[in-house]
Amino acid sequence: MFAFSSSSSSAANVGSSGVSSGNMGVEILEIDGSTPHPGVVIDGSIACRETNGGWVTLRSKSPLCGNERQWAMKVIDQGEGTDGSGLMMGLLPSLSSQQESSMSNKYISELGGWCLSRAGDSYGSWKCDKMPFSTGCVVEFDWDAVTRTLYMVSGKRKAIGHIPNVSETDVLYPAFSMYYLNQKLSFV
């Protein structure tokens, strides 16, 4: 996917795995519509926020596993918020059913995950370089479970985050959190 990637992806068919083949063999993840998402409509691969205010977190249908540790998200529209913190991208750990029900009113780090805001600030228990994003940006991610490092690229900007309290065997899901009206995101 990008130069400092240490793993490779293999193509897979869309199905129960929750992925489809993208360019260069990179997996395009599917949005998990089974978790609560009030005020968000999932249309194919696009999630659209149709109400204003209140967090909703969505994740990929399938967790990262094996060589499938690269993904990308596109900000189709950052929505009507201007504060820079109403849109988050990152990783969620495996959640209990009680925590899953809280995805309808919490953002990623409130659920125990690690994320970047649209302004580029990091939330959760990790150290990460600042990397803002906005409408039209594609943010590419590469998770190295051995070193517990998340590499991110968007255009010419690069960031590196280190998550010390994760093990190689932890189940992790790419995720995003939405707050403002008209936000649109997709896995690409």
Image (cartoon, rainbow, N blue to C red):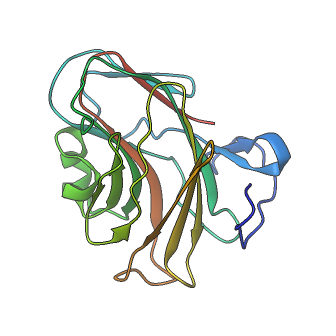
Residue 27: image x %, image y %? 71, 48
Q: Could you say which is closer to the camera, residue 145 or residue 66? A: 145
Residue 150: give x, y in percent of width and height: 51, 67
Q: Is residue 146 above or below residue 133?
A: below
Quadrant of res 4: bottom right
Q: Is residue 82 left or right of residue 91?
A: left
Expressed as whole percent of the image width and height from the top left, the position of residue 121 reads 30, 52
Q: Residue at x 72, y 73 (%)?
A: 6
- State the image coordinates of residue 159 (x, y, percent, origin top left): 50, 60
The image quarter containing residue 66 is bottom right
For the N terminus, which image quadrant? Answer: bottom right
Q: Residue at x 43, y 50 (%)?
A: 131
Q: In the image, what residue occupies the spot 54% across and 53% down?
A: 62
User: What quarter of the picture does the C terminus occupy?
Assistant: top right
**Camera-side residue: 33 or 76?**
76
Residue 178 lies, with reference to residue 92, above or below; the image says above
Q: Residue furthest right?
A: 24
Q: Judge from the rendering whether residue 161 lies leftward or rightward of residue 144; answer left or right.
A: left
Which residue lies at the image location 78% right of the left edge and 44% below the top edge? Answer: 13
Looking at the image, how many numbered discs can be counted on the residues?
0
Determine whether 85 is above or below 143 in the image.
above
